[in-house]
Amino acid sequence: MTRRRPWVRGGLPFLRSGPLWRVHTKALPRLDEFVAQHGYRRIELDGRRMTSRDAAHAELKRAFELPEWCGANWDAFDDGLGHFVSAHDGELVAVVWLHADEAARLAPATAVEVGWALLLCTTGGMPSLPTRSTLHVDLDVFAVGDGPDFDGPDGDDPDAPAHEDDGS
């Protein structure tokens, strides 16, 4: 079933980042509500497992349930992701990359490659699918972590408690 891709900033107006949405850990409950409300298929990556290139590929393979034949390189990931898209054609998919800051600390170059590969997917850039293929998923990537580089509900201070809008 094809659903219309939701407006992320409309549902999570505190986000200043994008298209790789950087969400502060304290805003994770709001992100989870948004993902559930809009019927996304939730794919969860654990950045703490991405300690090397091989470990990152193993985590991607686990999270996306890629075929056994999918190896630990970007060509194989692209092929495996094409398989994922074929199986989930037309779906909304949210990649929730927990501990993205840890992945960047543990294996910085690999974390950049993972982010780049996922961002390519958000724009439909999957070379393993035929050029004229109508297969697609609407993918949003949410990198979750701590620190000032991640957006929280109160703008510049993600450690401040969230406030409710009283409508005034």
Image (cartoon, rainbow, N blue to C red):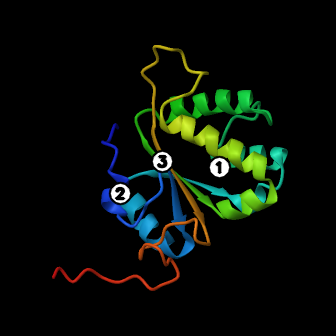
Q: CA distance from mark 3 to mark 1?
A: 21 Å
Q: Is residue 147 above or below residue 140?
A: below
Q: Amino acid at mark 2?
A: Arg
Label 1 vs 2, first from the N-terminus: 2
* Crowd band around label 2 with a 10 angstrom C-alpha radius: few (<14), some (14–19), many (20+): few
Q: Which sits earlier in the primary sequence, circle 2 or circle 3?
A: 2
Where is the C terminus found, in terms of image quarters? bottom left
Query: Which residue is located at x 32 percent, y 51 percent?
Result: 7
Crowding at mark 1 (Cα within 10 Å: few <14, some 14-19, many 20+): some
The one of 79 and 164 positioned closer to us in this rendering: 164
Q: Please state the horizontal and vertical placement of residue 155, each as a whole percent of the image.
A: 43, 72
Residues at marks 2 and 3, CA–CA distance in whole angstroms = 10 Å
Residue at 77 percent of width and 54 percent of height: 50
Per the rendering, the mark at residue 9 is 2
Helix, strand, or loop for circle 1?
A: helix
Residue on which the image places disc 1:
63
Q: Is 11 placed above or below 40 here?
A: below
Residue 43's x, y, as percent? 56, 52
Q: Which mark is residue 10?
A: none
Vertical order, 114 against 164 (above or below): above
Quadrant occupied by the N terminus? top left
Regarding mark 2 in the picture, which secondary structure is present there?
helix
Residue closest to the eye, 98 or 16: 16
The amino acid on which the numbered mark 3 sits, given as a three-letter code, is: Pro
Find residue 19 and name its label.
3
